[in-house]
Image (tube, rainbow, N blue to C red):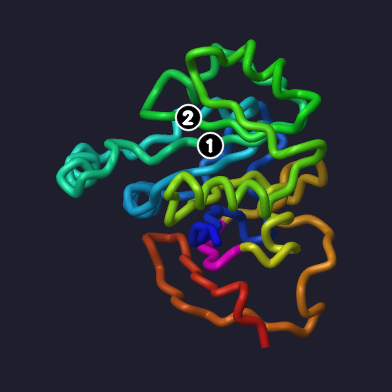
Amino acid sequence: MTTRPYVLLSAAMSVDGYLDDASPKRLLLSNAADFDRVDEVRASCDAILIGATTVRRDNPRLLVNSAERRAKRIAEGRSEYPLKITVTRTGDLSSDLNFWHHGGAKLVFTVDEAVEKARATLDGLADVVSVGPKLDWGLVLDELGRRDIGRLMVEGGGTIHTQFMAQNLADELHLAVAPLLVGQPTAPRFLGAADYPGGTTARMRLLEARTVGDVVLLRYAPGERS
């Protein structure tokens, strides 16, 4: 039986639960020390996953920035960068985005009706795999297990975080809470409405709480609700 990867959800949010504001420019919620913490977590993982909406909106490179951490990965017999993964139901991804042109290997999960479109657009840039007629996160994790991905970092966006939490697929949650208030109804939120396991009274186990500059890092075990 395939062993699925350990799934770590990572997000920075405002005190009122937003991942960004509604402006075209990305809102920087974390500080320099927390960005470095995230870089360290990325370096510890075999793969990093973000949704196609985040790829299009933020146009990130999604790298391990520290040369020392990359060198350590190589010394350990690992790739310089974690595998970069995105997920799309439509196949609507431009080949010009930063995601494809920085770092190491890239993998795209999609559905049957969009797989040929994505392969044509990303020929030579990414491995494109369909998981069937509809997106199934269980099948995505199974495929990653077959590819020897032991530790997966999921960096959003909010729709993907919501789906992982609602389907009880997250082993660990890292929340960096920034001392900001967004309050804009059209801005993206960390989590949306869903039928979460255990209902409204199920409490996750707190693994750690500490300050990183003016940000508070909260680590939870979502699967250990009581």
C-alpha span from label 2 to label 1: 6 Å
For badge 2, the amino acid type reads Lys
Q: Is residue 144 magenta?
A: no
In the image, residue 141 above or below residue 199? above
Question: Can residue 218 be seen in this snapshot?
Answer: yes
Q: Badge 1: few (under 14), some or many (20 or more) residues near its Cα, within 10 Å?
A: many
Residues at circles 2 and 1 in contact by the CB criterion of under 8 Å = yes
Q: Nearer the viewer, residue 224 or 115?
A: 115
Q: Range of the magenta residues? A: 170-179
Left/right of residue 193 with respect to residue 104 in the rendered view: right
Q: Which residue is mark 1?
A: 85
Q: Secondary structure at mark 2?
A: strand
In the image, residue 49 above or below residue 33? above
For badge 1, the amino acid type reads Ile
The location of residue 195, given as percent across then percent down, is 84, 67
* The residue positioned farthest toward the front in the image shown: 1
Q: Is residue 174 magenta?
A: yes
**Residue at x-position 40% and y-position 68%:** 211
Question: Can residue 177 be seen in this snapshot?
Answer: no
Q: Which residue is mark 2?
A: 106
**Residue at x-position 47% and y-position 36%:** 84
Point out the image quarter for the N terminus: bottom right
